[in-house]
Image: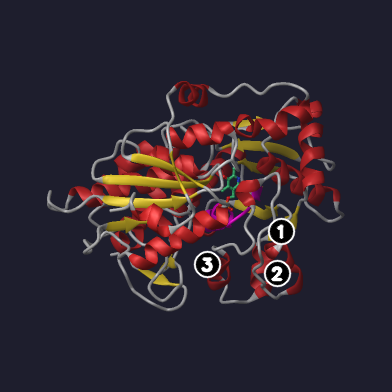
């Protein structure tokens, strides 16, 4: 039986509890009791990303009611291709490749974790009596990320999704992508900023009983990115890429809340043969500053071109520090980090396009820039680098197109979404207005 503990000491709890929780009751985040060492040869024997995910995640599902369904869940979450794209070589002959994580239904890497979690939760709910009230998943989004959750839960039995977004502060395409789903997904424009959306979500959770257990006033659930059900599957694509790209490949990971970066570290710990890990932040510098000074200080977030990474106080820092017993020296030997400001993001998008014809989204551009910068610094190893390409550039067309001087065609899955009708409600930024849309 696999067990999980809170970073603040609570637990043990089982997998079902972890998947149904946001934070642990003691305020910490759930982590596995231990990470299995999967063995390089066994990992290498896996023939598809889905098979690899199933093999790596089996120890975490041991003894759970979902264990038998894991192959099916992985096949569903890892159905899309995971191609590499070649960039111009680095200074010391380093080979640079993008790992394209954006072939899912909303063209961002968050599709992997969201689909995996949705498939798990639907199966947990299916075992409840038919009279149990539906679960309402409530999320706030600053634009890009809510679509992955909306898509993953669209049309599922017994689950509703309410997505809050700041009215007029997201692009028309992003707005369209939040409202174009089945009837169980409701998009709501809040007359206010992203902070208002987040405040409303917090208030809703404070006033209702969270979790899947039936509560008097309906059930609210979260599917936010600190849920382990989103994090664990992300380790599988890093491992897959490392096994495909060659022993000891280094990774640069565009980093906001540190979910993807932590998943990469866990993949290495599980035996995937990953070399260095470079966390590429935007102008939100909490992680690079922590590695430089040894003191961790969460901040207010600042707005950047890579807005899905605008996180001032990354939630998964708590998991990272916990993993290394709070010892910054050990963290430093495990990962490095860099901050890339908007000027560098712009130059990088222009430069890579003229050098190799590849259009980058602003987040991916931060990863590529941090990678090239670290290669240019004395002492950085050459060798193979893989940069996680976290979103398709067509999702950030207003940034990317003027820089490269041409249009970026949306991939087929986004075109299909844009062709669907889209609808949303609008509310003032107060709890009474939101409450009318909640159970
Ligand atoms: C969420 C997101 C990131 C940051 O990932 P974290 O797991 O929060 O560090 C980077 N790029 C894109 C496109 C994202 O949507």
Real-space CA distance between mark 3 and mark 1, rounded to the nearest whole angstrom: 16 Å
Q: Are marks 1 and 2 in contact (CB under 8 Å)?
A: yes
Residue 212 in picture, x, y percent from top left = 27, 59
Residue 114 in sight here: yes
Q: Is label 3 in a helix, a strand or a loop?
A: helix
Mark 2 residue crowding within 10 angstroms, few (<14) / some (14–19) / many (20+): some
> For residue 337, which numbered disc appears in the image?
1
Q: Nearer the viewer, residue 382 or 117?
A: 117
Residue 327: in magenta span: no
Does residue 106 appear in this view? no
Q: How many marks?
A: 3
Q: Nearer the viewer, residue 420 or 325?
A: 420
Q: Residue at x 73, y 38 (%)?
A: 95
Q: Which residue is mark 2?
A: 290
User: Does the closest atom of ligand 1 sit within 8 Å of the Cβ of label 1?
Assistant: no
Within 10 angstroms of label 1, few (less than 14), some, or many (20 or more) residues?
many
Mark 3, Cα crowd under 10 Å, few <14 / some 14-19 / many 20+, is many
Which mark is first along the chain, 3 or 2?
2
Of the residues under marks 1 and 2, which one precedes in the sequence? 2
In percent of width and height, residue 388 lies at 62, 43
In this picture, residue 386 sits left or right of residue 150: right
* Sooner in the amino-acid sequence: mark 3 or mark 1: 3
Marks 1/2: CA–CA distance: 9 Å
Circles 3 and 1, Cβ within 8 Å, touching? The answer is no
Pointer 3 residue: 319
Span colored in magenta: 251-268
User: Residue at 58% across / 44% down in the picture?
Assistant: 242
Determine whether 412 is above or below 87 in the image: above
């Amino acid at each position: 039986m696999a067990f999980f503990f809170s970073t603040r000491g609570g637990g043990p709890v089982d997998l079902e509890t972890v998947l149904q929780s946001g934070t642990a009751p003691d305020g910490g985040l759930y982590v596995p009791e231990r990470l299995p060492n999967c063995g390089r040869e066994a990992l290498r024997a896996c023939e598809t990303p889905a098979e690899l995910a199933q093999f790596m995640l089996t120890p975490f599902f041991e003894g759970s009611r979902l264990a038998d369904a894991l192959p099916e869940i992985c096949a569903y979450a890892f159905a899309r291709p995971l191609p590499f794209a070649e960039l111009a070589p680095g200074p010391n002959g380093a080979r640079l490749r993008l790992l394209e994580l954006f072939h899912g239904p909303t063209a961002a890497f968050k599709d992997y974790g969201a689909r995996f979690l949705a498939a798990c939760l639907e199966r947990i709910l299916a075992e409840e009596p038919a009279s149990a009230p539906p679960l309402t998943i409530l999320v706030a989004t600053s634009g890009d990320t809510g679509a992955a959750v909306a898509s993953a839960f669209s049309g599922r039995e017994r689950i509703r999704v309410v997505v809050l977004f700041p009215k007029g502060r997201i692009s028309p395409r992003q707005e369209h992508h939040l409202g174009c789903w089945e009837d169980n997904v409701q998009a709501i424009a809040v007359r206010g900023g992203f902070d208002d959306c987040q405040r409303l979500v917090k208030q809703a959770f404070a006033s209702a009983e969270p979790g899947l257990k039936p509560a008097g006033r309906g059930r609210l659930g979260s599917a936010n990115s600190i849920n382990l059900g989103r994090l664990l599957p992300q380790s599988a694509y890093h491992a897959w890429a490392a096994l495909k790209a060659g022993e000891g490949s280094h990774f640069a990971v565009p980093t906001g809340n540190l979910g993807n970066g932590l998943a990469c570290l866990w993949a290495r710990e599980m035996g995937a043969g990953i070399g260095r890990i470079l966390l590429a932040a935007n102008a939100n510098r909490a992680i690079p500053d922590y590695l430089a000074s040894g003191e961790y200080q969460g901040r207010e977030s600042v707005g950047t071109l890579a807005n899905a990474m605008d996180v001032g106080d990354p939630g998964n820092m708590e998991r990272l520090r916990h993993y290394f017993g709070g010892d910054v020296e050990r963290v430093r030997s495990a990962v490095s980090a860099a901050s890339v400001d908007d000027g560098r993001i712009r130059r990088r998008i222009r430069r890579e396009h003229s050098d190799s014809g590849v259009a980058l989204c602003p987040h991916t551009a931060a990863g590529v820039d941090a990678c090239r910068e670290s290669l240019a610094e004395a002492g950085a190893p050459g060798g193979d680098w893989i940069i996680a390409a976290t979103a398709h550039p067509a999702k950030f067309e207003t940034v990317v197109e003027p820089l490269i001087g041409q249009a970026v065609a949306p991939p087929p899955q986004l075109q299909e979404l844009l062709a669907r009708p889209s609808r949303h409600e609008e509310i003032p930024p107060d709890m009474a207005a939101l409450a009318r849309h909640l159970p």
